[in-house]
Amino acid sequence: MKISALSIAFVALACSTVSAIAQEKSEGSAIFDGKSLKGWSAPDMSWWSVKDGAITAVSSEAKPCKHNQFLVWQDGKLEDFELTLKFRIEGGKSANAGIQVRSMVEDDGHVMGYQCDIAHPDAPYLGCIYDEKSPRKLLAGRGMKTTIAADGSRTEEKIEGAEKALADYKQGEWADYKIKFIGNVLEIGINGVTTAIVIDQEEAEAEKSGILALQLHSGPAMTIQYKDLVLKKL
């Protein structure tokens, strides 16, 4: 049996594609090129830019942020995944931002859904899990594991050692953030330490898939930056 050069090329291409997919699943892939906002979009892009190799949003006295702003990743929805990134936030104790996962965009551009919170360390929100624009609001505070039952009732357990996440954290310096969402379990951590876990069994509210977005929160002057975003689909 003769094998044509075209057949060999096709097999080689297929093997290369399978190898690339396997590598992406095992190592993840960068979703921000460090130079541009290609692949990201917002209703008002004037809030977003790239500075110091990072996605950057700034509110100031000259240009105050009166409504939460969101930059949405345009390459599909997330189901089960792991996302790692670095963040840096500057501002007073009201400085606030976050990463939206398995969320949805409303007609006015506001994003609602699971939020992995970023804030000034003196505020209770850094490293917690919130439900943006939902009556459920705070799902798991920093250092807590929350199980939400089908009827919406909750039980909480303390995560031992969670306070170590802030031991090396310094306001205004880069810190690591890790988000892992498998099935109905959302787990987040800062600087290699788990800070909050939600097991969401409330089917009427739990989202199985949704968009990824970065937030600039309304309020006093602040700067939020995100870089080294690597997504691994599980």
Image (spheres, rainbow, N blue to C red):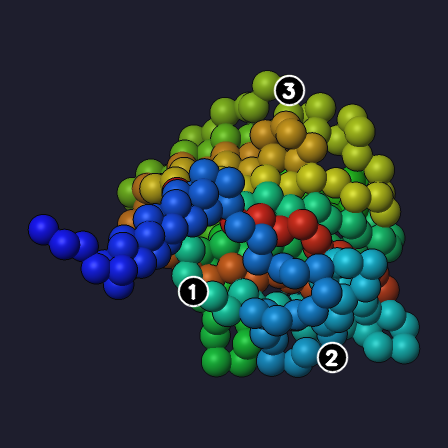
**At 78% from the left edge and 49% from the top edge, which residue is drawn?**
88
Residue 161's label in the rendered image is 3
212 with respect to 36 (left or right): left
Q: Nearer the viewer, residue 23 or 139?
A: 23
Location of residue 48 by image quarter: bottom right
Task: Work out whether residue 85 can be spotted.
Answer: yes
Lower position in the chain sequence, tag 1 or tag 3: 1
> Dot 1 corresponds to which residue?
76
Q: Quadrant of the C terminus?
A: top left
Q: List the single residue furthest toward the top.
A: 160
Q: Amino acid at mark 1?
A: Gly
Lower position in the chain sequence, tag 2 or tag 1: 2
Q: Nearer the viewer, residue 78 or 13?
A: 13
Q: Amino acid at mark 3?
A: Gly
Location of residue 151 by image quarter: top left
Mark toward the viewer: 2 or 1: 1
Residue 204 location, x and y as percent?
30, 54
Q: Is residue 97 above or below residue 142?
A: below
Residue 114 location, x and y as percent?
49, 53
